[in-house]
Image (cartoon, rainbow, N blue to C red):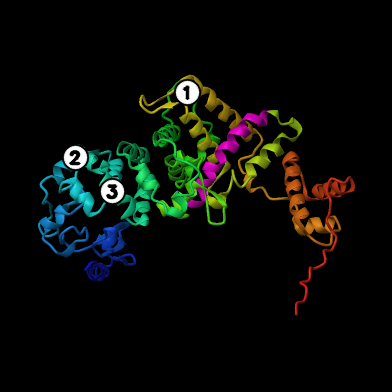
Amino acid sequence: MGEPFAEEFSQFARSKGVEPGRIGKIDKNPSQSKHLETATFKLFGLDLDFVNLRSEEYAGDSRIPTVSFGTPLEDAMRRDITINALFYNVHTKTVEDFTSKGLDDLKDGVIRTPLPPKETFADDPLRVLRCIRFASRFGFTLVQELKDAARDLEIQTALANKISKERVGVELDKMLKGQNPLSAIELFEELSLSNPVCSALPPTISEKMSGDPKDSIVALRNASVLNELTKNTLDTQIPSLHPFLSRRSQTDPTCRPRLFLASFLSPYLSLTYTDKKNKTFPAVEAIIREALKLGTQNHYLDGVPILCGAVAKTRHFLDTYPTYPRSTRRSSIGVFLRNKSIHNLNAGIHWSDSMLFTLVLELGEQYDAISDALNVERATAIISKYNDFATLAEELDLWDVGELRPLVDGKDVLSTLEAKRSGPWLAETLSKVVEWQLDNRDATKERCLNWLRLERQEGRIRVEDSEQPTAKRPRTK
């Protein structure tokens, strides 16, 4: 009944001069605990859901109910939490609290279920995640009975196996984009939910994992550090981040959710799996794609694996770049920062994001989640190391180095070097052009072409110009 009512409401809105958004429909799917058709559209910038009042009856051991029209009381008792079971009577203009708990819970900052929580969660295990989302969004407290039910093995198994991964991903995405993703990750840890959510993978992947993940406390540790870094709430004895390292998290609204997802999945950072062709892929990518179904929106699927894969490379780079010769220091650093495994704006990743996430993990090793504190001396040394590099990158004007384009294109190179055909050598030559540009900030196209001629004359650029005969397949009779 949701869609017909939404259509009537939409027509009514238009009759009053208000243009509603396009109506969408979410079909019922009882096998995955989606018992009612829901219609949705936007009005005044708000997302509205339309669904009829319901009553449910279960037959025998079946967990798929018979759903029928219900009274407001019956509907309210089947809601996920009491504060979501409040009705507004448009005739009396009053709030009606059929559970007799919703208004008090709203006032006291409490998350509880209208029915016993295990019954509510068995009806739809996704409600466990919804409880976490609302608690983290409003800073509310979960009642103890709800926490106990959320830890129940039967409920966690149903959450992993019964609920569509798309619904899980939607809830997690809302938590990550919310005001307090750290609170959500804290509740995941407290309720032991990380493994049921992240390990819900097809056997073709789970059976090919290279090992077991680290303890989920690692995720909380890293998320806590990230939260303090991005909100600048570190101990006053610890230096603040260089603006190069914090800029993106403050100016790009998609950056912070990506970093929190990467932190949430950091226990899996070193794991890989092999596919049917025996190719190796990061476990993080499989979890995002299969267990969370987050896809490339917000650059989760394409961006987060880059952040995780950049950690070891970035730590090694920060230990070695001080040894680079001064004469070629700008190009040596620039080439590293331009690497697609460090910087890829098509996947939402700037090299400073990779630096910041690597810093988070390095600081996380010095973080005590129990006392909620960093080792001040070690943290100061680590942040200073990253700040020193950021200061140098600013002096060398390398913020946009990842998007630097060669002064000349392939046609210019072919013409200048009198080459007849392109090939792998051309791409290598254009890479050398970029390196030369980085070390010659006042470079012009004419100077670049002269440099190319000299490099060819002195044998430092080799043009592969020989024609390769086309291989012919032998004729068979």
Q: Quadrant of the N terminus?
A: bottom left
Asked whether 310 falls inside the magenta stretch, the response is yes
> How packed is label 3: few (under 14 Cα within 10 Å), some, or many (20 or more)?
some
Q: Which residue is mark 3?
A: 130
The magenta span reads 297-322
> How packed is label 2: few (under 14 Cα within 10 Å), some, or many (20 or more)?
few
The answer to the question of whether label 3 and label 2 lie on touching residues, with beta carbons closer than 8 A, is: no
* Residue furthest to the right: 457
Q: Which residue is mark 2?
A: 145
| Residue at image point 48% right, 29% down | 363
Q: Nearer the viewer, mark 3 or mark 2?
A: 2
Q: Which residue is mark 1?
A: 238
| Residue at image point 26% right, 58% down | 33
- Kindly report the distance in space between the C-alpha atoms of the residues bearing marks 1 and 2: 40 Å
Q: Nearer the viewer, residue 429 or 60?
A: 60
Give the answer, above or below, for where 51 lies relative to 476: above
Q: Quadrant of the C terminus?
A: bottom right
Q: Nearer the viewer, mark 1 or mark 3?
A: 3
Query: Quick one: label 1 or label 3, which is nearer the N terminus?
Result: 3
Specify the label residue 418 is tagged with.
Answer: none
Residue 30: x %, y % from top left: 26, 62
| Residue at image point 20% right, 47% down | 118
Callout 3 amino acid: Arg
The answer to the question of whether label 1 and label 2 lie on touching residues, with beta carbons closer than 8 A, is: no
Q: Secondary structure at mark 2?
A: helix
Callout 1 amino acid: Ile
Callout 2 amino acid: Glu
Q: Main secondary structure of the magenta part?
A: helix
Whether residue 104 can be seen here: yes
Quarter of the image for residue 295 reads: bottom left
Q: Is residue 297 left or right of residue 68?
A: right
The tally of labels here is 3
